[in-house]
Amino acid sequence: MIRLLGLLFTAGFLVFCAGALAVGYVIYDKSEDLPTLETLTSYEPPVMTRVHAGDGSLLAEYAEQRRLYMPASVLPKRLIHAFISAEDKTFFTHAGIDWQGIVAAVIRYGQSKLRGENRRLGGASTITQQVAKNFFLSSDRKFERKLKEALLAQRIEQAFSKEQILELYLNEIFLGLGSYGVAAASLNYFGKSLKDLQLEEMAYLAALPKGPSNYHPFRQTERATERRNWVLAQMHENGYITAEELEATRKKPLVVNPRPYGVQLFASEIGAEAFAEEVRRDLEKAYGRKRLREGGLSVRTTLDLKLQIFARQALQRGLMKFDRERGWRGALAKLNLQEGEWGEALSKIKAYDDLRPWRLAVVLEVTPEQAKIGLQPASLKSGKLDTKRETALLPVKYMTWAREHIPGKNGKFKLGEVITTVDQVLSPGDVVYTAPSREEGLHHLVQVPEAEGGLVALDPHTGRVLALSGGFSYARSQFNRAVQAKRQPGSSFKPFVYAAALDNGYTPASVVLDAPFEIRQSNGEVWKPKNYSKKFYGPSTLRRGIELSRNVMTVRLAHDMGMKKVVNYARDFGVYDNLLPVLSMSLGAGETTLLRMTSAFAMFVNGGKRITPSLVDRVQDRHGRTVFRHDARDCSACKAKKWEGQAEPELVDARRAVINPYTAYQITSMLEGVVQRGTARKAFKDFDVPIAGKTGTTNDEKDAWFVGFSPDLAVGVYIGYDNPRPMGRAASGGGLAAPIFADFMKLALRGQPHTPFRVPRGIQLIPINPKSGQRAPYGAETTILEAFKPGEEPAEDNTVVIGGDPGFVPSGVSQVDSSARDGGLTTGTGGLY
């Protein structure tokens, strides 16, 4: 018997050894195949790029995975306690594997099998094992994968502290709503940073790792609340919260406030979507799509929030005013009010969400005095349609502008009869836009303008783009008219021709003949430029030529100097890269962008220094290292550790001179005359701050421009149709674009000191007659102070006429072929006014 027992013991021992050897071999074999932990030590997860305005306000986010990396040191203790209670209550005591939890899971699995339930073995994975799985393994439930997970977990525990493991886990896990990691989830679910979370909110986030879709806050509200309350109970059981806290928080409803993403953050609230999108394009071009969306860049832009709001307001007001003057184009759509409920039908029509407080509405009833309208119902955060129905009234007094638009040819139109009753404009079922009035319950009738435009404002000394509006509504069209639209600048290009002239022997008082001019082109055709008024005015000074935008004088100047000089100036100022050297280009017939024109004008007011427009001040990588800085000036002396009586650091101006400061000021002074006496005077008649600029209108009034500046702010405005067509005779740069510029400048410069334009040392200010260019006595009527470079002061009789007999003054209207072109070499005769 003893011998038998001995044999059985020996056999059992041998079997045990064989089993142990087998298990050991399997463990050894799988250990050899395990990945290294270098991935964890150099862990850099995909992190979203965040774009900020100049004051640090968040504008936009770009990411493949919406993640914000947070070190363990800044993670709230209670948040950690919530996740430990929900996922791994023995986390701080086990060595990677919770053997007690495994035994409990096996028992539960066996019990479920005895009951005939088809339940999977689970619930025993520790946080460390989840880290191993998330970083190195797949999600399958095979024994081999579970064994590797356990082995990796033990290695991780040996190589990393508990705090480091928690940091990896809480920054990597997916928590729904596109959120990776707890920091992103806190923002996306509650619109809060981690430090501002309430206890019940932390518990809900800790409930999500088991399956975010199973506990969706809107689709599975009851289930999500139960899971949150279970986490709270676990926190109490583990001693992390008191009984009173448990009872108080479990009674609270689950309140989730999903946060918008991308440019729909703060950018959409101030009309800066086009600005943010242009920044995105620049970043993607510089760093690539992957680094933009996964590199965790921190981008500080040049955007001034206040100026951006002003830019949007001024552009929208100007476009609406122009559109209203052209009448009512009719309802957007028609609903059958007899079929179904109007709110649901109206909700299916897309409304532009960046036009708030405008609302889409359907006309329910019409009387001669007013229309009853139903406002488009809102969509709830859950995605469902609000069951509440709002109505308002549209009185006839708020739609008197809506006379029928009757289109004609070449931009001409007529208006229908004067509006005296509502039924002249609206009928039941019409879908329209409305805007609330100051009278409660009453709305205005509004319509989205057909014409579009852009506005750019930048710092003329640095090129920092402070505001940029690319159109009336970004939701309607993402096309950026400030940056992407290439249009003829018309007469707004003329200052560059005059700058070339001033650097080649001319002065502002030089007299040029404004008389018929013709030139035979290479194809044999004769080109005869004309003025906007179709008249000629005889000998006129350069100042008068630019103030009154004389086309023929400009062409004569370009012809006298040679177009090569004009081409070179256009390139140096950045207006064009390769301008065609034909005379019509001197009138702005070549296409360029509003941003290019505005930055080029800025070089006049900054003293002739070359600037590069930039929407970005600084870019930092995920570690806070600066990888780009727009201000390229060297300031090594700025890095002193402390002040020891040394002088202030001097920053060397490295900007290249495009023209000399004398010429730059002469052009500035002449452009100031455009505002005071020239083609823009009506728009600035009530202005009391120094402003200079130039109007521009192209053939058939297809494009209207005004580009100008104050001493410290350069601004450009462009108006036109996306598919160019005539806007009508009144749609000139002075009549359409300049008032928008003026509206913006009044807002932007309000409360600012009235700094005069800076006069370079050595410039001579001499009184002259602006019409003749001759010296005039101080104080004489119509006398102006003209700016002359040193050594170019005019003599007592300085009349020298370029292009003809100084006594010749043509009369009448020249009969010029309006279809004349540069012999097919260009697309048009360019600037007119």
Image (spheres, rainbow, N blue to C red):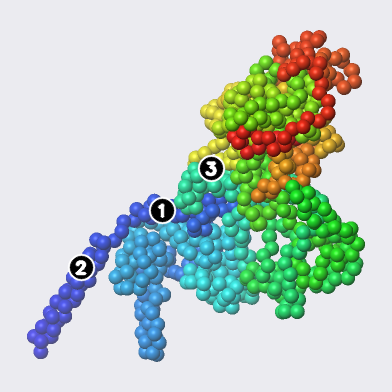
Q: Nearer the viewer, residue 681 or 615?
A: 681
Which callout, 3 or 1, points at the residue further toward the start of the chain? Answer: 1
Measure the alpha-carbon separation of dots 1 and 2.
31 Å
Q: The residue under label 3 is which amino acid type?
A: Val
Q: Nearer the viewer, residue 300 or 492?
A: 492
- What is the CA distance from the residue labelled 3 to the residue labelled 1? 22 Å
Q: Nearer the viewer, residue 416 or 471?
A: 416
Rendered residue at 68%/23% (across/down): 557
Q: Position of residue 414 (x, y in %)?
A: 82, 53
Quarter of the figure that contains the C terminus: top right
Q: Are marks 3 and 2 in contact (CB under 8 Å)?
A: no
**Which numbered marker is on residue 43?**
1
Amino acid tagged 2: Tyr
- For label 3, the SS is strand
- SS assignment at label 1: loop
Residue at 59% x, 58% y: name it. 261
**Closer to the camera: disc 3 or disc 1?**
3
* Residue plotted at (56% across, 53% down): 61
Report the mark closest to the observer, 3 or 2: 3
Q: Amino acid at mark 1?
A: Tyr
Depicted 589 relative to depicted 133: above or below: above
Q: Secondary structure at mark 2?
A: helix
Q: Gap in Å between the C-alphas at discs 3 and 2?
A: 53 Å
Residue bearing mark 3? 619
Query: Residue 25 bears which disc, if any?
Result: 2
Q: Is 668 located above or below residue 596 in the figure? A: above
